[in-house]
Amino acid sequence: GGDSDTGLARDALLRRLVRLGGATPASCKPAASLLQSLCFGDLSRSQAVVCRICERVEESDGRALRSALRAGTALVALSDGFVRERTVFLLKGVLHVARNNRR
């Protein structure tokens, strides 16, 4: 149906936003704004984005880390009713990845 198609399209867009994270300096701000508008007031969507950010951090290449950092920064900058929960989830996720990737 239409709702599931919309949800799939939104998920694909979020994956691309986290993956690319504003690949050029000119696209950083619009990408952050779009990510914020999609996650504003939606904790479950924010948590899904955090999981994608953590996947990018695990990849450990420079471009992936930069895009993950930009997406994480955009999430932390959101001011809604889920600031604390979103920030804690992001911090715990990134720390978990860092702990598991220690060599």
Image: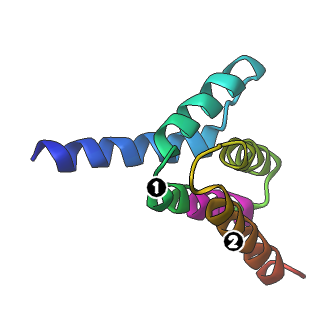
Distance between the alpha carbons at the discs numbered 1 and 2? 15 Å
Give the main secondary structure of the magenta stretch. Answer: helix
Using the rendered view, name the quadrant where residue 47 is placed.
bottom right
Q: Which residue is mark 2?
A: 93
| Residue 3, position as x, y percentages in the image | 18, 46
Q: Which residues are magenta?
A: 50-58
Q: Amino acid at mark 1?
A: Arg
Residue under the image location 78 percent in, 51 percent down: 65
100 in relation to 93, above or below: below
Q: Nearer the viewer, residue 73 or 103?
A: 73
Residue under the image location 58 percent in, 47 percent down: 80
85 in relation to 7, above or below: below
Q: Is residue 41 left or right of residue 102?
A: left
Q: Is residue 52 left or right of residue 1?
A: right
Furthest residue toward top: 26
Q: Which residue is mark 1?
A: 45
| Residue 4, position as x, y percentages in the image | 20, 50
Q: Amino acid at mark 2?
A: Gly
Residue 12 belongs to magenta span: no
In the rendered image, which quarter contains the C terminus?
bottom right
Specify the color scheme: rainbow
| Residue 99, position as x, y percentages in the image | 82, 81
**Dot 2: few (<14), some (14–19), or many (≥20) neighbours within 10 Å?**
some
Residue under the image location 58 percent in, 57 percent down: 82
Q: Nearer the viewer, residue 13 or 88?
A: 88
Furthest residue toward front: 81
